[in-house]
Image (cartoon, helix red, strand yellow):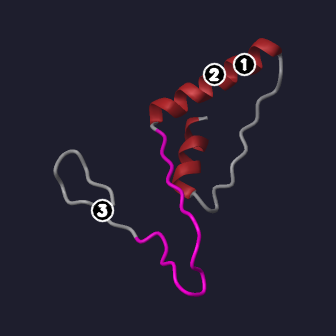
């Protein structure tokens, strides 16, 4: 559940239902801010430029489309 700081309605999402067929497992949550992605991109570019190396961004945006998409847009 995500509860916004502005007091608006929380968002609830079902991650997985563990049952007799799949009794154990784990889940993962990730986030990045636009500012942190820009900082990461800048440090990657600075590192590559300082060493005269090529820089490539590789993502697989088929699973985490919004998450990886933001990296692709910023880079």
* 23 in magenta: yes
Q: Measuring 81% from the left and 15% from the top, which residue is drawn there?
A: 51
Secondary structure of the residue carrying tag 2 is: helix
Q: Is residue 25 magenta?
A: yes
Closer to viewer: mark 1 or mark 3? 3
Tag 2 residue: 43
Quarter of the figure with residue 33: top left
Residue 2, picture quadrant: bottom left
Q: How many marks?
A: 3
Mark 1 surroundings: few (<14), some (14-19) or many (≥20) residues within 10 A: some
The one nearer the camera, 9 or 55, is 9
How far apart marks 1 and 3 lie (CA) works out to: 39 Å
**59 left or right of 14 in image:** right
Residue 1 higher or lower than 31, as above or below: below
Rendering quarter of residue 57: top right
From the image, tell me which residue sits under label 3: 11
Q: Residue beneath label 1, please?
A: 47
The image shows residue 21, relative to residue 24, as above or below, that is below
Instruction: Tell me where the magenta segment starts and ends, as one range.
Output: 14-32
Q: Which residue is pictured at 59% across the width and 28% down the height?
A: 40
**Which comes sooner in the sequence, label 1 or label 3?**
3
- Distance from Cα at disc 3 to Cα at disc 2: 34 Å
The residue most toward the top is 50
């Amino acid at each position: 559940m995500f509860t916004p700081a502005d007091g608006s309605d929380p968002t609830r999402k079902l991650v997985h239902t563990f049952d007799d067929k799949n009794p154990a497992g784990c889940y993962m949550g990730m986030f990045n801010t636009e500012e942190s992605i820009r900082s990461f991109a800048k440090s990657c570019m600075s590192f590559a430029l300082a060493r005269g190396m090529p820089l490539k961004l590789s993502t697989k945006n088929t699973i985490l489309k919004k998450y990886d998409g933001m990296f692709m847009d910023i880079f």
